[in-house]
Image: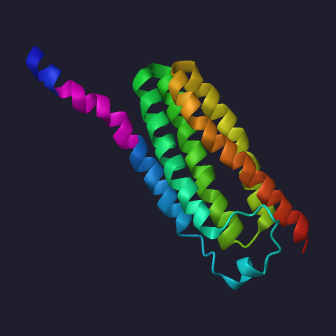
Amino acid sequence: MRLLSEKQAPSHRLAPYVVTATAVSAAAVAGAAAVDADDAWYRRLDKPAFQPPAWAFGAVWTPLYASIAWAGGHALQQAAGRRRRTLAAALGANLVLNTAWSWLFFRAQSPKAGLAGTLLIDLSNIVLIRRTADVDRAGAWALLPYAGWCGFATALNAAIVKRNPA
């Protein structure tokens, strides 16, 4: 019996990573479904000079999504009981907000709604990093670039709102 549990241990250790990678991938796909950077509405928006080129978003988001999946899996592996449930809820809420931003900004064609959404993501990032740090410092550190990029996205979104008041 002991050998059986030892054989199951590696897959048990991988389970949190599989769950978070699946959740992050689903959020990325669902968010991308709302984005059309070639849309005439988006092209007409007056964007600030610090707007990165279109290719940069994919180049940045790919490793950020990977770090979210790793950090979430690593932290969930360390957590148990109530801490695990609240951490999973914080990660899930964050991914929902992340996905919702694309739908608010691009699909609803509303920079103002997008700004509200990205502010909620920023708040959610604070909660997620704090909950992660409670159980896993390495996971919390791994989330900092994501939080930084989201802060930049908030500034970018705010500048777009200011430049496009109508």
Tell me if residue 1 can be seen: no
In the image, residue 29 lies in the stretch drawn in magenta: no
Location of residue 147 by image quarter: top right
Identify the residue shown where x is 72% and y is 43%: 122
Horizontal and vertical percent position of residue 53: 66, 67
Q: Quadrant of the C terminus?
A: bottom right
Tell me if residue 114 can be seen: yes
The count of marks equals 0
Horizontal and vertical percent position of residue 58: 54, 61
Question: Is residue 158 found left or right of 70 in the rendered image?
Answer: right
Which sits in the foreground, 65 or 4? Answer: 65
What range of the chain is rendered magenta?
8-19
Which sits in the foreground, 74 or 4? Answer: 74
Identify the residue shown where x is 34% and y is 42%: 18
Which residue extends farthest top? 2
Identify the residue shown where x is 49% and y is 29%: 85
Is the residue 106 above or below the residue 71 in the image?
Answer: below
Is the residue 18 above or below the residue 82 in the image?
Answer: below
Horizontal and vertical percent position of residue 104: 69, 64
Q: What secondary structure prevails in the magenta region?
A: helix
Horizontal and vertical percent position of residue 110: 76, 69
Identify the residue shown where x is 78% and y is 81%: 44
In the image, residue 9 lies in the stretch drawn in magenta: yes
Color theme of the render = rainbow
Question: Is residue 94 found left or right of 104 in the rendered image?
Answer: left
